[in-house]
Image: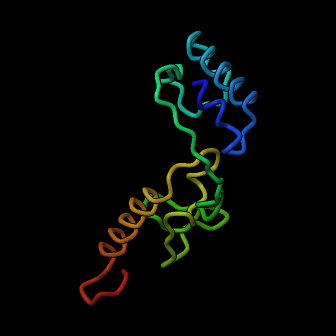
Amino acid sequence: MEELVRQAGTLGVAPVQLRETIDVFNGAANNGTTHLLDVPKSRYVYPVMTPPFYGVLVQPGITSSMGGLKVNQNAQVLDAVGKTIGGLYACGVDIGNLNNRHYAGNLSIGLVFGMAAADHITHSLDSGGRTA
């Protein structure tokens, strides 16, 4: 751990700050008080103790938005009063009512709601290929 702390500056991190962050995290993990930390998943939180340790420079990026169109279980877009807008479907990052508070993974939302839309559309067609 000390070697990583010594090299922290090469990643643009202050060594003292890295050491303090690791100590606070390990203390919380050892005491079972991870709920006091901003840890998204705390069920399997263990102290960082066993080498080897690696540091990686990462950059935040926007991969999706929080907000968008409200849809139902068929991926049909809903208007302001909750009625479907005929022929309008949405999936993935365009859906807003699933990512209200937390990121839910837009690739999976794209897949699931894309399939729901396709299923709904194909089952809504009459024998002539027109929506019923």
Quadrant of the rendering where the C terminus is positioned: bottom left
Judging from the image, the colouring scheme is rainbow
Give me the residue at 72% from left, 31% from top: 15
Give me the residue at 55% from left, 74% from top: 85
Give me the residue at 27% from left, 90% from top: 128
- What is the quadrant of residue 20 in the picture? top right
Image location of residue 130, percent across then percent down: 34, 87
Give me the residue at 57% from left, 39% from top: 55
Query: Could you tell whether 108 is left or right of 90 in the image?
Result: left
Query: Could you tell whether 83 is left or right of 13 in the image?
Result: left
- What is the quadrant of residue 123 in the picture? bottom left
Q: Residue furthest left?
A: 127
Image location of residue 109, percent across then percent down: 46, 57
Does residue 60 sit above or below 128 in this rendering?
above
Image location of residue 1, percent across then percent down: 57, 24
Q: Residue furthest top?
A: 31
Does residue 131 sit above or below 103 in this rendering?
below
Q: Nearer the viewer, residue 61 or 6?
A: 6
Image location of residue 119, percent across then percent down: 32, 68
